[in-house]
Image: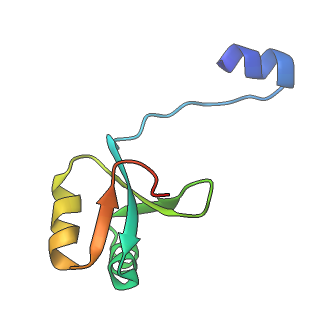
Amino acid sequence: MMQRLELEYNVHAVLESVPFRIARWITGDPKGLAWMKARRDYTVVEDRHGQPVALAESTWPLQYAARENPGMEFHDVEPL
C-alpha cells in the first residue's frame, strides 16, 4: 500500500501503530459523552457519519465510563 501511494499518487505516507484495540459507538445521554471528552484518559473520535466512537486499549475504561454515566451506551457496531 505504501509503495502504491508513492508510485501512483506521489504521496509519501507513514504508518504508525496505536495502542487501541477496541472501538465502540456511543449513544444515550449526551452528558456521558461530554464527560468522556472532558477527560484526558479517553479518546473519542467521529466516524464517517459524525457519530462519536470511543477508542480504548481494553474494555475496562469503557465499563468504568458506563458505570459513571448511567444512560450512556456502547455498541460494537454502528447503530442504525
Residue 30, given in percent of the width and then of the height, sits at 40, 82
Q: Is residue 10 above or below residue 51?
A: above
Tell whether 76 sits left or right of 62. right
Position of the N terminus by quadrant: top right
Residue drawn 85% across and 25% down? 10
Tell whether 44 sits left or right of 19. right
Q: In this view of the protein, which residue sits in the foreground, 25 or 80?
A: 80
Q: Judge whether residue 63 can be spotted in this image.
A: yes
**Residue furthest to the bottom:** 31
Residue 23, given in percent of the width and then of the height, sits at 37, 48
Give the number of callouts: 0
What scheme was used to colour the molecule? rainbow
Residue drawn 84% across and 18% down? 8
Looking at the rendering, which quadrant does residue 15 occupy? top right
Residue drawn 82% across and 15% down? 7
Q: Is residue 20 above or below residue 65?
A: above
Residue 48, given in percent of the width and then of the height, sits at 62, 53
Q: In this view of the protein, which residue sits in the foreground, 66 or 78?
A: 78
Residue 41, given in percent of the width and then of the height, sits at 29, 65
Residue drawn 74% across and 16% down? 4
Looking at the rendering, which quadrant does residue 42 occupy? bottom left
Tell whether 51 sits left or right of 21. right
Q: Judge whether residue 41 can be spotted in this image.
A: no
